[in-house]
Amino acid sequence: MKSSRGHLAALKKKLRTEIPATRRLGIEPVQCADGALVLKAPLAPNRNDKGTAFAGSLSAAATLAGWSAIWLALRDAGLEGIIVIQDCAIRFLRPVTRDFEARCPKPASAQLARFLATLRKHGKARLKLRITIRQGGADAVTFAGRYVVRLSR
């Protein structure tokens, strides 16, 4: 994941045009540097009846952070593919009471290299990612997702 503004602008356009829920939830990429991709979201359109972030919105933000990180990695590698989430585990550790960010660290170089090599060789590959949403200096949500990518033909 490179940190250029052009990459973030392209990702923002992709999310806005092809994943309409991002517009309704206010989810947008804000950073791709320091080894992580960060998506932000405002609390207001994601609030539940308790005034905290709705679990579905937190799950969507985490899922999209992983999806977006893979999309950027494919773009960096000059590849295009269909990205889907295969499975995930999410833990809601504490309420989220304000605007939030989903952070997806860049995969280790060896892990990313294996993923891309498999994708090029077989046209399909899987990648596991971990995403966090923090509040008050502590994890509020932890998410582990396995994504499947199939090269576009």
Image: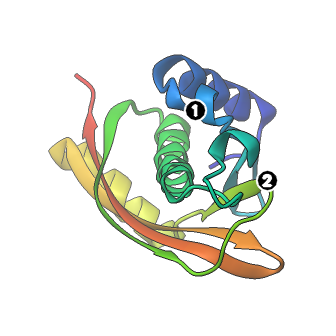
Q: Quadrant of residue 6?
A: top right
Tell me what residue is drawn at x 52 percent, y 35 percent.
75
Indicate the position of residue 30 as horizontal and vertical percent values. Answer: 77, 43
Residue drawn at 64 percent across, 79 percent down: 94
Which callout, 1 or 2, points to the residue nearer the camera? 2
Instruction: Please tell me which residue is depicted at 62% across the width and 26% down the height of the picture.
Output: 23
Identity, as a three-letter code, of the amino acid under mark 2: Asp
Please say if 7 is above or below 107. Answer: above
Identity, as a three-letter code, of the amino acid under mark 1: Thr
Q: Badge 2: few (under 14), some or many (20 or more) residues near its Cα, within 10 Å?
A: some
Do residues under tags 1 and 2 come within 8 Å of each other at their CB atoms?
no
* Tag of residue 22: 1
Task: Write down the quadrant of residue 151 in the picture.
Answer: top left
Secondary structure beneath dot 1 equals helix
Give whichever of 87, 149 is nearer the camera.
Answer: 87
Determine the residue located farthest toward the left in the rendered image: 122
The way the protein has been coloured in the rendering is: rainbow
For the residue carrying disc 1, how many other residues have a C-alpha within 10 Å: few (<14), some (14-19), or many (20+)?
some
Q: CA distance from mark 1 to mark 2?
A: 15 Å
Q: Relative to the observer, which residue lies in front, 152 or 131?
A: 131
Of residues 80 and 98, the one nearer the viewer is: 98
- To which residue does mark 2 refer? 99
Q: Where residue 80 sits: x, y (%)?
A: 38, 30
